[in-house]
Image (tube, rainbow, N blue to C red):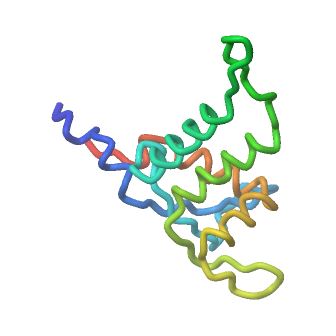
């Protein structure tokens, strides 16, 4: 077994994620192109989020105090990570019009369409999509 085939470099090569209908599970013509969570872009995003988390910590009487957990912030950080992994898409429409890919439009889709967010999240975390034998 050649371990080179399993380096994180493979996660930098985008793959097509065919979006499935949320009720029937049938493939649609919507395709979102993503890199994996081991990609450089994903790692840079996580590093920035962790650095911000550490900057948000306070020291009170010599003790480190963590900020309160904010579920909205957590969800937004997850969406930001998915946006960092997304490189493009095909056949995406919003309100009857083609939606050009931008990081902002990807953020909007992941925020407003949880079923797509879930499918993309699952794909970015699936190492088998990015590795070869």
Judged left or right of residue 88, residue 106 is right
Q: Position of residue 114 (x, y in %)?
A: 78, 53
Give the residue at x 77% y 58%.
111
Judged left or right of residue 112, residue 132 is left
> Where 2 sits versus 9, above or below?
above
Give the residue at x 56% y 72%.
89
Q: Residue furthest top?
A: 62
Q: Position of residue 66 (x, y in %)?
A: 72, 23
Which part of the image, by quadrant, shows the N terminus?
Answer: top left
Determine the image quadrant of residue 60: top right
Give the residue at x 81% y 37%.
71
Determine the image quadrant of residue 131: top left
Q: Residue furthest left?
A: 2
- In the image, 28 versus 32, the foreground residue is 32
- In the image, 4 versus 43, the foreground residue is 43
> Where 40 sits versus 7, above or below?
below
């Amino acid at each position: 077994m050649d371990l080179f085939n399993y380096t994180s470099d493979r996660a930098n090569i985008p793959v097509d994620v065919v979006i499935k209908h949320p009720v029937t599970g049938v493939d649609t013509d919507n395709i979102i192109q993503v890199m994996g969570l081991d990609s450089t872009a994903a790692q840079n995003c996580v590093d920035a989020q962790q650095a911000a988390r550490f900057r948000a910590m306070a020291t009170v009487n010599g003790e480190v105090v963590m900020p309160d957990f904010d579920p909205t912030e957590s969800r937004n950080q997850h969406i930001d990570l998915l946006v960092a992994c997304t490189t493009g898409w095909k056949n995406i429409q919003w309100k009857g019009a083609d939606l050009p890919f931008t990081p902002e439009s990807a953020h909007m889709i992941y925020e407003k369409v949880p079923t797509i967010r879930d499918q993309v999240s699952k794909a970015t975390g699936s190492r088998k999509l990015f590795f070869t034998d």
